[in-house]
Amino acid sequence: MPVKKKVTKKRTVKKAAPKKRTVAKKATAKKKTVKKKVAKKTTTRKTTKKATARKTTARKTTARKTTRTAATRKKAAPRKKAAPKKKAKRKPNPAFMRPMTLSEALGAVVGTKPIPRTEVTKKLWIYIKKNGLQDAVNRRMINADDKLKRVFGGKKKVSMFEMTKLVSKHME
């Protein structure tokens, strides 16, 4: 990209017709003209190609810096999230809360009264922990005693997940 040279023109200053002045005024007038001449000399200097190239690169870098900072300033602050709405308490499914009649084998462990499925599971866990039937090494496994063997279909070891499946067969 070619670099454009800035051409400066010499300005010619028209002088007014000489007037009669006092000595003090002439001294101040000379000082002013000297300052003007010095100013003209600085503006009429021609710059070299290297100097103009330096100036243009300096301009480009400053322009880049300003655009980067402007871009970062334009980013909007992240919006604050709205406070979560308070949910109403979860209502239990009425099917789980319906009292179920239990078989004789399950009634021996939990009780003979009709109770909901959730209560059956709670009472089963109370019985398991009370008698220490949970396996010490693999806590997911349950070691069945004589009462629980009848509920589990004759199995000695049953996993927690399989237990719920086998217990559901004893409820109507």
Image (cartoon, rainbow, N blue to C red):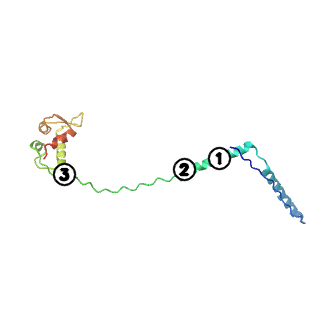
Instruction: Reply above or below: 21 against 129.
Output: below
Query: What residue sits 81% from the left and 51% below the top?
Result: 41
Q: Amino acid at mark 1?
A: Lys
| Location of mark 3 (residue) | 95
Could you give the CA–CA distance between mark 3 and mark 2, rounded to whole angstroms?
58 Å
Q: Position of residue 71 (x, y in %)?
A: 55, 50
User: Label 2: few (<14), some or many (≥20) within 10 Å?
Assistant: few
Residue 129 can be seen, yes or no: no
Determine whether the residue tagged by mark 1 lies in a helix, strand or loop. helix
Q: Amino acid at mark 3?
A: Ala
User: Label 1: few (<14), some or many (≥20) within 10 Å?
Assistant: few
Give the residue furthest to the left: 104
| Location of mark 1 (residue) | 60
Q: Amino acid at mark 2?
A: Thr
Q: Nearer the viewer, mark 1 or mark 2?
A: 1
| Location of mark 2 (residue) | 72
Quadrant (top left, top right, bottom left, bottom right) of the N terminus: top right
Q: Position of residue 9 (x, y in %)?
A: 79, 53
Q: Position of residue 87 (x, y in %)?
A: 31, 56
Label 3 vs 2, first from the N-terminus: 2
Could you give the CA–CA distance between mark 1 and mark 2, rounded to whole angstroms?
18 Å
Determine whether the residue tagged by mark 2 lies in a helix, strand or loop. helix
Determine whether the residue tagged by mark 3 lies in a helix, strand or loop. helix
Could you give the CA–CA distance between mark 3 and mark 1, rounded to whole angstroms?
75 Å
